[in-house]
Image (cartoon, rainbow, N blue to C red):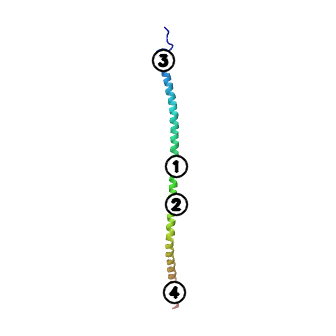
Amino acid sequence: MGQPRVNLKEGRKLVTLVVNLLVGLSQFFTITFLFVGWFWSIAWGGLLIIHSMQYREALQQRRQEAVATAAIEALTKDSILHRRDVKTLVKSHKQQARDKKTAQSDPKKK
């Protein structure tokens, strides 16, 4: 009878070699996709951080504009009242100045 070309031990070695090659190829493709996924997730994380920083700056700017608008409205509403107060203060100051002048000029006349 003829003898097989590949004996039992060599057959196991050949199967082991093929299995190891398949495992190596699958690891190569897996690692490649994992690295791509890893870099992809890092890129998205960076983009989200940049977006959140821009959003926070926009919120701060909107708040500052709202505060400035409220302050301007408050000043313009109070400015009418403030003008009235200033007018009365100016009138009273002028009256006091007149009274002082008249008081100073009266003793000199006597």
Placement of 22 over or under 56, stated as above or below: above
Sequence-first tag of 3 and 2: 3
Which mark is nearer the camera, 3 or 4? 3
In 3D space, how far apart are the residues under numbered discs 4 and 1 (Cα atoms)? 73 Å
Dot 2: what SS?
A: helix
In 3D space, how far apart are the residues under numbered discs 3 and 4 (Cα atoms)? 131 Å
Which mark is nearer the camera, 2 or 4? 2
Residue 11 image label? 3
Residue at 51%, 69% (x, y): give it: 76
Residue flagged by tag 1: what amino acid is it?
His
Residue 65 image label? 2
Tell me if label 2 and label 1 are in contact, CB under 8 Å.
no
Residue placed under numbered mark 1 in the picture: 51
Rendered location of residue 68, percent (x, y): 51, 63
In 3D space, how far apart are the residues under numbered discs 2 and 4 (Cα atoms)? 53 Å
Rendered location of residue 59, percent (x, y): 50, 55
Sequence-first tag of 3 and 4: 3
Rendered location of residue 57, percent (x, y): 52, 54
Residue flagged by tag 2: what amino acid is it?
Glu
Tell me if label 3 and label 4 are in contact, CB under 8 Å.
no
Dot 1: what SS?
A: helix
Rendered location of residue 6, percent (x, y): 50, 15
Sequence-first tag of 2 and 1: 1
Residue placed under numbered mark 4 in the picture: 102
Sequence-first tag of 2 and 4: 2
10 Å crowding of disc 2: few (<14), some (14-19), many (20+): few
